[in-house]
Amino acid sequence: MDIANPTDEHAMLREMVRSFVTERVEPQALEYNNRERFNLELFRELGEMGLLGITVPEEYG
């Protein structure tokens, strides 16, 4: 893979993550950080999006 020239799939993944961060993470990040809390709802959303375990081959679940 050439990191300077991502595949269409990688570009789509990058845009999906960028949008999620902009729309869901950034608006609440400072508040959760200041309260020293973990936003479990966002973590679950990442799982629903298929982003947890993204480095694990699909054959392993």
Image (spheres, rainbow, N blue to C red):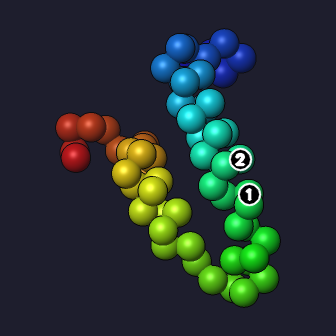
Q: Is residue 18 left or right of residue 34?
A: left
Mark-to-mark CA distance, 1 and 2 = 5 Å
Nearer-the-camera pick, 14 or 57: 14
Q: Which mark is residue 3?
A: none
Q: Residue at x 49, y 73 (%)?
A: 40
* Helix, strand or loop status at disc 1: helix
Residue 24 coordinates in the image, percent (x, y): 63, 55
Q: Vertical placement of 28 versus 21: above or below?
A: below
Q: Is residue 49 left or right of residue 2?
A: left
Q: Is residue 35 left or right of residue 61?
A: right
Q: Residue furthest bottom?
A: 35
Residue 2 coordinates in the image, percent (x, y): 63, 15
C-beta proximity under 8 Å, tags 1 and 2: yes
Tag 2: amino acid: Thr
Q: Residues within 10 Å of mark 2 (few under 14, many from 20)?
A: few
Q: Which mark is residue 26?
A: 1
Tag 1: amino acid: Glu
Q: Residues within 10 Å of mark 1 (few under 14, many from 20)?
A: few
Q: Is residue 28 left or right of residue 41?
A: right
Q: Residue at x 56, y 73 (%)?
A: 39
Q: Quadrant of residue 12?
A: top right
The residue to which callout 2 is attached is 22
Residue 43 coordinates in the image, percent (x, y): 48, 63
Q: Residue at x 70, y 67 (%)?
A: 28
Q: Residue at x 58, y 77 (%)?
A: 38
